[in-house]
Amino acid sequence: MKIGVFVCHCGSNIEATVDTAAVAAAAREFPGVVFATDTMYTCSEPGQDEIVDAIKEHNLGGVVVASCTPRMHEQTFRRTVERAGLNKYLFEMANIREHVSWIGKDREANTNKSVDLVRMATEKLLRNRALHPKKFTINKRVLIIGGGVAGIQAALDCADGGLEVVMVEKTSTIGGKMAKLDKTFPTVDCSSCILGPRMVDVAQHPNITLYAYSEIEEIKGYVGNFEIKVKKKATYVDWKNCTGCGICMEKCPSKKATDTFNEEIGKTTAINIPFPQAIPKKAKIDPAFCTMLKKGKCGICAKVCPSGCIDYEMKDEFITEKVGAIVTATGFDLFDWTVYGEYGGGRYPDVITSLQYERMLSASGPTGGHIKRPSDGKEPKNVVFIQCVGSRDKSVGRPYCTGFCCMYTAKQAILTKDHLPQSQSYVFYMDIRATGKLYDEFTRRAMEEYDTNYIRGRVSMIYPKGDKLLVRGADTLMGTQVEVDADLVVLAVGAESSAGASELAEKLRISYDSYGFYMEGHPKLKPVETNTAGVYLAGACQGPKDIPSSVGQGSAAAAKVLGLFSKDQLESDPQVSIVDIKRCIGCGKCIQTCPFGAIKEIDFRGMVKADVIETICQGCGICTSTCPQGAVQLQHATDNQILSEVNALCQF
Amino acid sequence: MKVININSSYNSEFVKEVEEESGQKLNLCYQCGKCTAGCPYTDEYDICVSQIMRLTQAGQKETVLKANSLWLCATCESCTARCPNQIDVARIMDVLRHMARREGYGGTGRVKTFWDSFLSSVKNNGRVFEVGLLVNYISHTGRFWTDIDLGPTMLPKGKIHFKPTEMQGKKEVEKIFMRFKEESAK
Amino acid sequence: MNTSLNYAYYPGCSSTGTSIEYDMSSRAVCAALDIKLNDVPDWSCCGSTPAHTVDHSLSSALSARNLNQVASIGMDSCITPCPSCLANLKTATHRMEDEAFRNKVNKLLDKPADTRVSTKSVLQILVEDYGIENIRKKVVRPLKGLVVGAYYGCILNRPAELMQFDDSEHPMAMDNIMEALGATVVPFPLKVECCGASFGIPRKDVVMRLSGKLLDTAHAIGAKALVTACPLCQMNLDMRQNQINHANGSHHNIPIFYFTQLLGLALGLTEKEMGMNKLCVSPRTLLDAMANEETIKEKAA
């Protein structure tokens, strides 16, 4: 094989600490190399043309590019060599940027290491062979995990685009966090007025199947052909016949159940529909509070239900759905602020979270939209908002900025004045982050028109003084300590990844950061993709996001799914395992270890052999290291290819 | 008010010294003010603790070491306990006091005089001799009325002794002070 | 329960003077609970706040001499009633883990510092090693009718990384002990606020303001007494209560106990053993009222 080597400067990224000309010169001495050069930007159009020209001029059979990570440009250069008529697997990349120039300053050592990496790449390339992908048909259905605003947007866009959509929502209603909000910034329009119709659309869309109060149990398969096991949790109510009339709720004697939807501002009944606009509007029983389920006594809901839907014997049910793509839109949860002992750690009833305050502001909330102190039901006069509670705070392990608290705090201050014109709001803030369209104008309005008193500083302590709360903070602009007598304190609690996010990520085989937020394919260029083909992200599961951004991502993820499904067939990656039938002894170890179930047992002339199902194999290579005979070989990473790289590196 | 030239007035040696002696990184401070918010002594300070932090970060040695605040911090640790960036602010205040002493600032405050009297009592007796400490303090400040009102209440309680308690190793303690003086002079 | 609780005991300077009743009651309570205390032989001052404001190696050397004294009687576990001593001894041990710092300290000492000794407060071992439930079992004279708030002071629990005991913002150790003794505990909101510390002599005005706020708060929440675990806190609130009233125009008459005094009383020890007569604000009325409750109960029984 005649090999050409192209060593990239990447501007000064590589050239500043690697002598690329020397690397090219060294490469010319390697077996098989007939051409080597260094270029300013190999990925640029002239850079790629140089490769094409060299292939033709020198009749090259393979190409090595020494530049950045394959994650960046492997696809680019594979297309380049294909353009010159070579099979795209007759190409190798040596990463001399991330692995060399960016991590070391010693030019000589960097140059030597680059030479080693190029030598390894050429040795491997000599053993590469042309590979050809197979085509397989895809299932053009999409699974949306999470029924918040991002998931709803993705579901509706996909369904309107003609796709069949399966939506799985953990709680008994869709709507997510947005459904809990009273108004939205910066327009102060009613959250349920704009979200409600979308929720109804989900329920009514002929292309959407909704599983509420359900969770993802298991995910098998691969892009185009996923198999999803959904756990429909027992609701103890037959939803086919439940009309959502609410009589059961009226009559239920167990009235101390946890009201998750209302952020525990009030209590609810053991059988409940979370809120009037719930979708689906169906009742479910909370077994932790139902006397019938706990003690076998009561049964009132069964007696009063006009449709006879109550079924105390109901069990969890498992359903299998087949889809070709998955959009994850699992949102966020609030940080557990009770770690702040200095804010009372949850001991003071009139210190509440911003989301609890939303429920209080909402006409459909437990106070009917009236702002009342939880302790005594009185209207507050001085309301203190504290920002960055669980945001930008290393001491509680949350160094990041949640990003939307500044905005909702301004909104809540405005709404407070609307509800209680005699009230005065105070906002303790560190910086005001209002970078969206019309956002800064909005926070200014809170100050200029609604007389919100913004105080620049953190709060160090809240403690009860009589029937008020004394808030002790700093005004760093005045340069002193300040105290505010507050009737109500609202904590702008930061966002964290939703409960169970990491467990779901493991089922999806996608990566997540140290806070549990899902990793996008590329921080700039692949915001809704993951590194697992066919799995996309929408909304705050990727990182805290406000409504417009979440909706934008929902649509973006839908566009990606629609793009994927625009083809009837997908090409499978030929970098899969292949069994050498002559060497295989039929021990079955590979079948046991394959995490994807991609290897099956076959009968070959009366002998047991292993066989790889190419479309299922993900090319992980576990079987190759398990096989005692070396009979399974991963294409493009065979034992011979890997050993040749090792030999190239360890030749002295 | 004084206009400060931010680069020419930046004393990098000072910043380095504070960081080394305190083991804290000053640039972790983002001026949220939580230390000032919780500091019980802000009422007495001439410069609040968050501004001491900022001035130190900005290398304003003279202003920092002259601050009365340094002598009014009681090391109650509320700043350290609540700093979102886990800076040991109280330790920085301590280190600034050490530097101020070394460089001859803040020698007139009553708190410092009291602390000095306390330590001389320890040096002489191995333990604190409360009456001796008070007498020493009064003699240095001339504040002869200090706590005189407590006498009638305290005397009958048997809490006040007019002689220090004797301990064997008081020379050992004195040697610690002597060696410290020698080491500091080096 | 570990039946052989055995510690070196570092009383601290104030134990011989202004906080003599803390020392008396701590010793008596430990004896009553079969906790063996071995006096640190020929202990010296830890240096308290003044030493660490001068230099950290000086402060640690003064503490290290005492840690060495603990080691000299073959012990590695030391307890002290005083939070200021506790903070200094613990800080010294912690900082001397750093070799360069340890060397600096050793230059000031006759013999190199022994860094194996760990220090805890009397309160901590009562809660963690002896156990509140075991204390509850030993109560013979419950503190019925006593409405008390627990005030911990600033440095008993913080910084949390160093002190490693209870909650740094909302400690409960003394609340729980008082509850176990049968007292009615009212949550004291300023549990960890500073009382003015050692500024009583040089800056009495500061103590008047800070301790005054504590007494105002105690009064506002209906506490008839406060319990403390710190000689400085107790002194500022008790000995200076009259001064505070005078300065602030208040009329507080709130007895300030060491928690060990009330613990001892509940264990059946006498008022004299607990040094109740050493308190400046007389607890007489409160103690009589408690005794009355007791008799009423006995009569009823």
Image: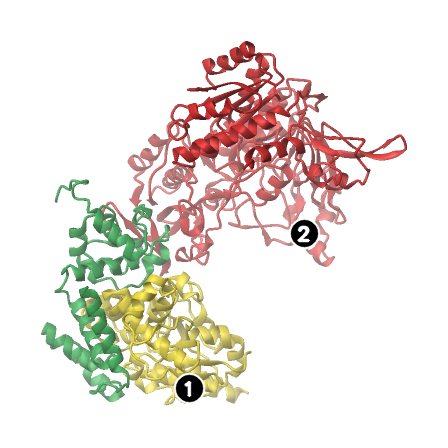
Q: Chain of mark 1?
A: C
Report the front residue among C182 and A372. C182
Q: Disc 2 marks which amino acid?
A: Pro
Crowd band around label 2 with a 10 angstrom C-alpha radius: few (<14), some (14–19), many (20+): some
Horizontal side, residue A646 vs residue A477: left or right: right
Residue hosting label 1: C28
Chain whose colour in the figure is green:
B
Report the front residue among B172 and A340. B172
- Which residue shows up at 45% across the image and 86% down it? C31
Quadrant the C terminus of chain A occupies? top right
Where is residue A174 drawn, in percent x and y? Answer: 60, 36
The colour assigned to chain C within the rendered structure? yellow
Where is residue C279 drawn, in percent x and y? Answer: 31, 82
Where is residue A440 drawn, in percent x and y? Answer: 34, 31
Q: Disc 1 marks which amino acid?
A: Ala
Chain whose colour in the figure is red:
A
- Which residue shows up at 53% across the image and 50% down it? A266
Horizontal side, residue C281 vs residue A66: left or right: left
Report the front residue among B8 and A25. A25
Residue hosting label 2: A287
Crowd band around label 1 with a 10 angstrom C-alpha radius: few (<14), some (14–19), many (20+): many
Where is residue C174 drawn, in percent x and y? Answer: 43, 72
Query: Which scheme is used to colour this image of the protein?
Result: by chain
